[in-house]
Image (tube, rainbow, N blue to C red):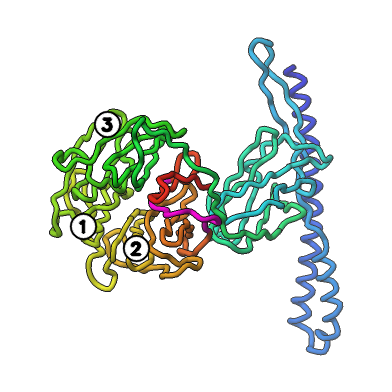
Amino acid sequence: REREAIISLETTRVTRLERINSAIQEAQFLLKQMKQAVEFAKTLTDRSSSSDIMRNKETLKQRFEVLREIEVPKHDETSFVKFTAASVKDLKLGFIEAIPKADAKRSTLEGLEQTLQAGVETVFTLCSKTSEGKISQADLKNQIEVLIEPAKDVTNVIVGEKEDGNLQLKFTPKVPGAYGIEVKINGDKLPTCPLTVQVKERELLVVGEMDLKFFPGDVPKRLYGIAVNTEGKVTVTDKSAGRVYVFNNEGHCLRKIGCSNEDNSGEFKAPSGVVCSNVDEVLVADELSSKVKQLNIQTGAILKMFGKRGAGKGEIKCPIDVSLDDNGRIVLTEYGNNRIHLLSQEGETISIFGDRGFAKLDDPISCIHCRDRFLVSDSGNHCIKVFNHSGSFLYRFGQQGNGDGQFKSPYGICLDNSNNLLVCDRGNNRVQQFSLIDNRFTGKTITDLPDPTGIATAPDGRILVTSGKTNKVYILK
């Protein structure tokens, strides 16, 4: 077997060396012709009169055109050698085989008939075939070159293997418009490339409702905030009933925490926004008690709380939503003080912004942190306001109305799994989508969504939206 392997490799080496030497000779001959043409042109321009140059102009032009049409030879192998190890029980080392290389001219890109939507991952299948039209078994991941334009509007470009031996081309177009795609295998373009595909605005579909199974006797009064941990457990606040519910991903209630009780500071008065701080714990903004409470959703215990009612530094008034920034700091939206309050994990004030100047907030509802920016839904001004990491106002987008990109009392906001900004446009009974690249409107729900209030994304890609009017959790995709 060793002798057979050596003979096979030697045969392959000799054959390829012959092809390489042949390609070198052709390239050298072509280079010699090009140099002769250049030298002739140089001599003509240096030593001849203008009339001689003009007389020889057409001849020289034709000579260069002939040279341009000659295809530069390249050494392009049609196969490569692959060693496949055998199983130990067969007591064989393995075998060597020549694997036919993929031929770009015979390969195709499938899935072009699908409708592409902004902010939604697109998947094409690259069917790589050999020069004989058979499916290529070669490992092509490092031999594929993908170019998508405009590059600034595309993210998550990935080439991966499928189970059937073909390859997948994945990417996410961020905004609507025309995109040019070019795919090369070993430097050669597919016959259909470059090609142009059209990306439409995203149509967010209401695909159903969570089948929430409350404990016997519990009737929701006003579902508000929602958060989903990495295990898929869903925490929902009932603002009017003073309760926090924990459901599994199928809607079965696992735990009920709190009840409305003015005399017990450990209970909730109006739990609003909620965020997962880890797989076992959540932070809840209790609006009427002006406190933030940390809960263990496994045990139902309130681990700690902080907040003193007031408008000064370190004081809180009517916190309506809570989130975490990229450093794990607490971002509190104070409805009562019309400001954003950035706090440490221990509840100590780090900074306050949005409460003064021409960028002053009016009934802010939700604030999230993304890419060193804070995005705030300013319901009173019917817009989204953007601040930098230090709290300085940058710009706003949106205005009052019911057109695309316009708002009527925007409420909960979040990022989906593709980093699209989703906004509960509460007064218009819809959810809108925006690109984080340039804040451009890129999609919306196409059916009526009554009173969308809180919004969160689940690990499986579902978008969950609470409705205080119907007391349901809607599922968008």
Question: Is 296 situated above or below 311?
Answer: above
- Circle 1 packing at 10 Å, graded few (<14), some (14-19), many (20+), is some
Check residue 300 in the rendering and tell me which mark sits there, or answer none. 3
Secondary structure under the numbered disc 3 in the rendered image: loop
Question: Residue at point 80% right, 59% down?
Answer: 30
Check residue 351 in the rendering and tell me which mark sits there, or answer none. 1
Relative to the observer, which residue lies in front, 422 or 219? 219
Q: Would residue 209 appear left or right of 389 to someone viewing this image?
A: right
Check residue 379 in the rendering and tell me which mark sits there, or answer none. 2
Residue 252 position, x and y percent, is 42, 31
Tell me how far mark 1 sits from mark 2, CA to CA. Answer: 22 Å
Q: Looking at the image, do the residues carrying marks 3 and 1 touch, with CB atoms under 8 Å apart?
A: no
Q: Earlier in the sequence, mark 3 or mark 1?
A: 3
Question: Is 374 situated above or below 41?
Answer: above
- Circle 3 packing at 10 Å, graded few (<14), some (14-19), many (20+), is some
Q: Looking at the image, do the residues carrying marks 2 and 3 touch, with CB atoms under 8 Å apart?
A: no
Q: Amino acid at mark 3?
A: Gly
Q: Amino acid at mark 1?
A: Ser
- Circle 2 packing at 10 Å, graded few (<14), some (14-19), many (20+), is many
